[in-house]
Image (cartoon, rainbow, N blue to C red):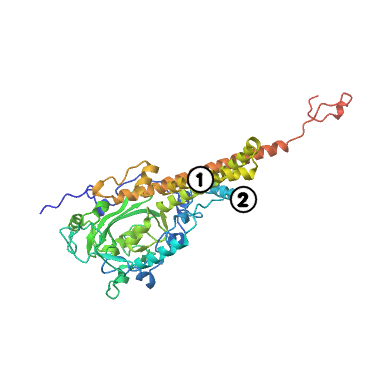
Amino acid sequence: MASRQQSSHMAQPMGKAAMGRQVAEPIAASEEYMKYLTNLIPSTTELIKAGFVVTPLTKKELQTKVKCKKCNKKCTKTDRPPRDPSHAGDGSSNGSFANETTSTASNAGSSHTGHKRRHRSHGKPHDKGKQGDATSTNSKQEQPRIICKYHPGRIKNKTWTCCSLHVSQPPCSGAPTHTPLTYAPGALEARWLFVPTPPHPSSNPQAPQFRSAVAIDCEMGTSADLESELIRLSLIDYFSGQILIDSLVRPLVPMQHMNTRYSGVTRQDIQNAVRNGTCILGGLEEARREVWKFVGPETVVVGHSVRNDLVCLRWIHTRCVDSLLVEEGVRKEVKRREEVEWEEKMDGEISRMLVMAATKHGKNKSEFLDDEEEKINKKEEEEKKKRERRSREGMSLKALAEKKLGRVIQDGGKKGHDSVEDAVAARDLIHHHILGLMQNDKEEREEKARKEAEEKAKEAADDGPETWGAPPMNYCVSHFPAGWGI
């Protein structure tokens, strides 16, 4: 029986045939470059805040993975700290293009004693009688909150048998609490077993050497228990730009669907890869072993939202550089500079308008402030909203690649993403950022050297030999200094 035509991404050689294929321009490796790259590695605290798993899950954390047998959602929420983009890039880990400049600006802003602006409250007094009536009405209408929403039937011909609605329609039944799924002994632990990077490569003496840095991207499908499951693994050498791994991965758990719209992988693609011997057959465990042939504990792993790739591999690795976190750090620094500059601008405008009011309109400072305060506060709110919009826009890999690299990726439509293309894009985003840091530091060194040269020239001019003035007419020639020329 003829196999279906593979997607364009699958048409490229995969498995062992893909290894060594050049997919990106090489980057010159040096100690200086590695220093810039490792400076982008977040601290352990920052990794935890960003949602990375840095230690094997505890029993309490494992309980947050328990699913509801009716709606397939998690029964309890995780206690891990929520991700806070404002913390990304603190310190030296995700340094922006102008850390020192920003630090100076922040110090200036903290020492600046600008005028305190009062924000008026436009709230209306509450009617106690009406409020009491509303409270009593609400108490009468209170109903149990539906936490678990589900379809009790099965899917048949893209329709739910319980309500005859299309599969895309919201659940028709609900319950106030979840019903935890019963797991076989050790099943939950095995499903969520995270493994750290081993210190030594494969026992095979022919195994390749560890790389100093790699870029990774994974494609995931959805398992029967609605968890993301690895189905394609791509790993490239950061500096050479060559493929180390590009293989489909056969899941060892039942799959609901392959998420083909985004992953670009179909069930038929996996079946073809199994027949052709280009597929990783051992699931996550074998996929990790393949990665560890090239990645040691000191290897820097680069990716975009690389936390998701590590989670789907159940892999603990703390030497990571995430292009998403780096971009968040850059935007945080830019936002901080803009806030300081805006404060200085507003304080200057207030001072200028106060003087104008006192001289031209005859109003004193306090009267003028009361008249113009609302306008100033309105301008501040508008500027704040603009900054927030700028900080949120374009954080996806596709948007950043187009904005910073001028490159269009993930344009395959229904054919999905190409994990090799995405890994290269994440790597090139980090390279672009490092080049900016290096250029910024070079300009600072040149400026510092120029100022030092000017200071030395000034000191040399101040400490130079004294110049003799014209001698008096009655001065004896023998008293002339040597070398005067007389």
Query: Number of callouts in the render?
Result: 2
Q: Residue 348 in the image: state x and y as whole percent.
A: 59, 42
Residue 401 located left or right of residue 165: right
Helix, strand or loop at disc 2?
Answer: helix
Helix, strand or loop at disc 1?
Answer: helix
Residue occupied by mark 2: 111
Q: Which residue is the extreme one toward the bottom?
A: 185
Residue 343 located left or right of residue 2: right
Circle 2 crowding by C-alpha within 10 Å: few under 14, some 14–19, many from 20: few
Going by the numbered disc 1, the residue's amino acid type is Lys
149 or 472: nearer the viewer: 149
**What number is the disc on residue 143?**
none
Q: Residue 56 in the image: state x and y as whole percent.
A: 38, 68
Going by the numbered disc 2, the residue's amino acid type is Ser
Which residue: 27% across, 53% down?
Answer: 263
Which residue: 30% across, 60% down?
Answer: 290
Q: Which residue is the extreme one toward the left?
A: 1
Residue 65 located left or right of residue 447: left
Q: Residue 411 in the image: state x and y as whole percent.
A: 28, 45
154 or 271: nearer the viewer: 154
Quadrant location of the C terminus in the rendered image: top right
What's the distance in space between the residues labelled 1 and 2, CA to CA? 25 Å
**What number is the disc on residue 378?**
1
**Quadrant in the picture for residue 51:** bottom left
Residue 98 seen in render: no
Which residue: 48% across, 45% down?
Answer: 382
169 or 296: nearer the viewer: 169
Q: Which residue is the extreme one toward the front?
A: 129
Residue 358 seen in render: yes
Q: Residue 448 in the image: state x and y as whole percent.
A: 59, 42
Quadrant location of the N terminus in the rendered image: bottom left
Circle 1 crowding by C-alpha within 10 Å: few under 14, some 14–19, many from 20: few
